[in-house]
Image (tube, rainbow, N blue to C red):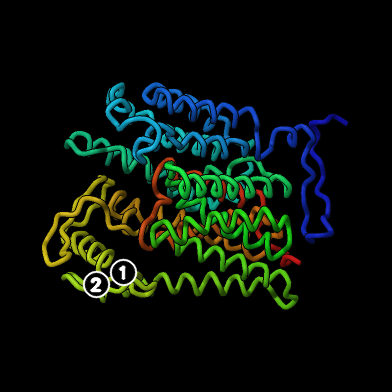
Amino acid sequence: MSSYATHLPTLDPALGWPTVRPRRAALARDRAINPYLITLAFIYLAWSYFHLSSSIWARFLFASYLILRMRPDIILPYAISCMQLRLNLALGDGFGSGLEDVYAGLTGYESYAFSLPPVLMAVRTVIAMFDARVNRAALPMGVAIAWLLAGLLVVAGAIYAKSAGYGWTASVRMYAVVGSGLYGMLMPRLDQRELTRLGGSLAFMAAVLSLSALYGTYASQLLFLLGPVAAVWGTSGVLSRTKPLRSAVELVISGAFCVFSSTFMLMLTWLWCAIAGVVEQAAVRSRHEPYKRIHAFILVSFVCCVAVFAMGLVLHVEDKAESDQSVMGRLESKLYKDRGPLWVGFIRSMYEEPLLLPVPGRAFNIRSFGKDTLWRNGPHNLVLELLRQMGLIVGPICVAVLAAMVMRLSRVMAYDPNRGARAIATGAISAVMIGGVTLPFVLADRQGEIILMAAGLVVTSCWRGVGWPQQPRR
């Protein structure tokens, strides 16, 4: 029989659901780690130190190739390509002198080199949605079609913003980042071994970046999304005694930065993922409907997020007030003094001047620390930021896309036995649900698409059909 013949489904006795044995030729391509692409990514990283301006365009070509390739092995090199070594070191007062020589060779057109890859990812997603050779079983087709049609309004809003003299790329990039989860769902599947390697590689990258931030001068904002992945990966490894030494080292290093040396939001997402790792391991060892514990944990977390948001709205403080530096004091200060006035001010502006088209960069008035201020930096909340950048039509559609992904990722957490898949799924849920309450880094380009792309790949790799899962994990 030809090697290209379609293989019949076989029953996997360990999982209890039908699986399709992949062809040998396909397995040779669908790997999580591609040494050649990773080597090219590190060459770019070194290039970005010696000559930033030309490396930006080299990164544009490299990222465009990776996006068009659309295979699982692009995630790690794409993540590496999202860093600029020279710029971050200069900002951190590291090697080299200030920023004058860094910006000397820039022409102003480099912003397009960063804006176009997310747009290319959105176009590639649309092409894959209508490609008969692509497996669309895991794709939430309803919200995917709505996201596709919403792109017409995004383009119209960008044209209007450009003609009116506003910045026009922000909404286009955010729309593409939201769609990167759909992009990941349309990738070829990974097997169990490769999913473990992908999760472990992202956790290892988080540990390396944490170490460089603790003892060096280079700190990447990728840690806001990858740090929590290292938390659940390390916790599950220690508790399950799967490479416990490596897991403990990654857990301690990432925790040392995320908990003690970073923002309050990153501390919360890291701790949530560490607790989620404990809950998952307890569920694995339970014989009485273990998946219900994980569903209950996610539901309680969601209710807490809604309650925190409501408290920030109702109990916001607009005048100066003292607060202690305890954990609860910092939480109250973050909600009532910092985020609460932003949320109230934005909601008031949307009520007074509702915006339908996606016109990015909308400023709004807030009252904070006893004075009125025109705020231009966003409401610092995922749902509100999507409404601000995308309008009252496209914004809710983007929220629905992320909600559909979280629902599928919660099934991975509850039912799938693969450690790497659970780590990525848990990290993505924390980025959307926990981190989205106060600072949605998951919506930023060159950050959010990495975790959302990996999460989409996890969903399609673990998908088992309409009735998935047929049996809980054992």
- Taking depth in this image into account, of 210 and 41 the one nearest to the observer is 210
Image quadrant assignment for residue 149? top left
Q: Which residue is mark 2?
A: 316
> Does residue 474 show up?
yes
Residue with the most extreme bottom position:
288
Q: Which x, y percent locates residue 473?
A: 73, 65
Q: Quadrant of the N terminus?
A: top right
Q: Which residue is mark 1?
A: 335
Q: Which x, y percent locates residue 270?
A: 50, 61
Return the disc, 2 or 1, that comes first in the chain's sequence: 2
Image quadrant assignment for residue 330? bottom left
**Residue type at the position of mark 2:** His
- Taking depth in this image into account, of 456 and 262 the one nearest to the observer is 262
Instruction: Identify whether 35 is placed above or below 172.
Output: above
**Residue type at the position of mark 1:** Leu
> Does residue 468 show up?
no
Q: What residue appears at the point 34 percent right and 39 percent down from the top-left corner?
A: 91
- Taking depth in this image into account, of 435 and 409 the one nearest to the observer is 435
Distance CA(mark 2)–CA(mark 1): 7 Å
Instruction: Identify whether 88 is placed above or below 437.
Output: above
